[in-house]
Image: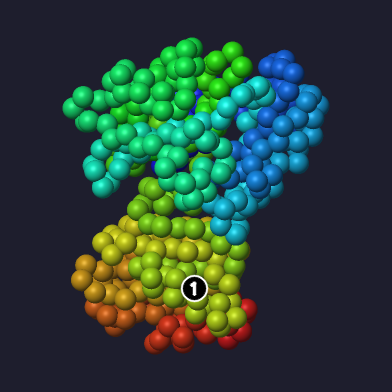
Amino acid sequence: MNIHEYQAKQILSRYGIGVPRGAVAYTPEEAEKVANDLGASGFVVKAQILAGDRGPAGGVKIVSTAADVRVTADKMLGTRLTTTQTGATGDTVTRVYVEEACDVTRELYVGMIVDRSTARVTLISSREGGTDIEVQVAKHPGKVDRFAIDPEEGLSSADARAVSEKLGLEGAAAEAAERALLGVYEAFIDLDASLIELNPLGVTRDQKLLALDAKMSFDDNALFRHKQIADLRDREDAGRLERARHGFNYIKLDGNIGCLVNGAGLAMATMDMIKASGGKPANFLDVPPVASRGQISEAFKLVLSDSGVAAVLVNVIGGGITRCDAVAEGISSAYQAISRRVPLVIRFEGTNRDLGKKTLRDTGVNFIPADTLADAATKVVRAAAGVR
């Protein structure tokens, strides 16, 4: 589970990590009020989406006055911001974060992850922070230091001090870094985080350290222990929320043909075949091989919740745990629960293929049968275009 920058900064500040003063805003007027309340000599307006690389995409702007903040927020809100991490469709900006501009002399990188290769929480640091950190890692891996933390000992003050020295910090800045690193580790362990990233971590002229940007991700399996973190998920978009609740992978696209497929590889092949047949997929949806009837039902409802979907293709290969009749029962349950009807093309293969089709007919689900993937793609493209 990911959270927004402003939410991450609110959490990290409680663990002693310095952050610039700021607040979130949902309208241009709110953004201007935040700027006036801050009373700073300059401001940064940041689009809040659950993806990185916002700066190069125009999602981070430095302005001088509160009036400029309002104008900038007005231009950002409601737009779709496309970055290297959002995919081609981008993410809609529903809120902006307004904070005071800071005068920093250096930008560093600090991150913490669970390193699967060592099964340890690992602290990652570099003297070169900012948007080019990935490029630096690829070109100059020696510029990035990794420190695997002993799970029994935890991160000690001596460890944190050693890392701050590697960052080239001295005096008050080194002491501030030591406190920040210990705070990051404490937050990571307390909240069952899977990622904390301070990039850049800025050093000010008066030797203070401020997280100019912050990212946090959490282990979904541990959210039952952290209601205050889980509650933040209510602010995510519907697709991410449903995916997390019901255990399937869903990504909304800009086409009009909904897809429900079991297996990521088959899902990609299905989307390719739809495009080759002249259609455009409305989503990527991969239900797991152990999906229950309830999960199938919720996945089908989510596909139909997109008002742009004109037809749906269900492409399921039964085998092992997945049975076509169980998938049919899930679809039937969703079909009876919602009133919206669009053309439905069904391709079942494998275990209980014929029983699955019979189940749909017996429960009153109208569908167009297809024998092959090519046949299914052709039929759903025609159905979406209103061709019988």
Residue at screen point 26% across, 47% down: 117
Quadrant in which the N terminus appears: top left
Quadrant in which the C terminus appears: bottom right
Q: Residues within 10 Å of mark 1 (few under 14, many from 20)?
A: many
Q: Position of residue 324 (x, y in %)?
A: 29, 74
| Quadrant housing residue 220 | top left
Q: Residue furthest left?
A: 152
Query: Is residue 30 visible in this depiction of the protein?
Result: no
Residue at screen point 76% across, 41% down: 75
| Quadrant housing residue 357 | bottom left
- Indicate whether 318 appears above or below 22: below
Of 8 and 275, which appears nearest the observer? 8
Its colouring scheme is rainbow
Residue at screen point 42% across, 34% down: 125
Q: Position of residue 314 (x, y in %)?
A: 42, 73
- Indicate whether 292 appears above or below 387: above
- Indicate whether 215 appears above or below 20: below
Q: Position of residue 97 (x, y in %)?
A: 63, 31
| Quadrant housing residue 114 | top left
Identify residue type, mark 1: Met
Task: Answer with left or right where residue 305 lies relative to residue 373.
Answer: right
Task: Answer with left or right where residue 233 lies relative to residue 147.
Answer: right
Q: Which residue is mark 1?
A: 271
Query: Is residue 189 visible in this depiction of the protein?
Result: yes
Of 160 and 197, which appears nearest the observer? 160
Q: Secondary structure at mark 1?
A: helix
- Indicate whether 250 appears above or below 102: below
* Total marks placed: 1
Residue at screen point 41% across, 52% down: 243
Q: Position of residue 175 (x, y in %)?
A: 43, 14
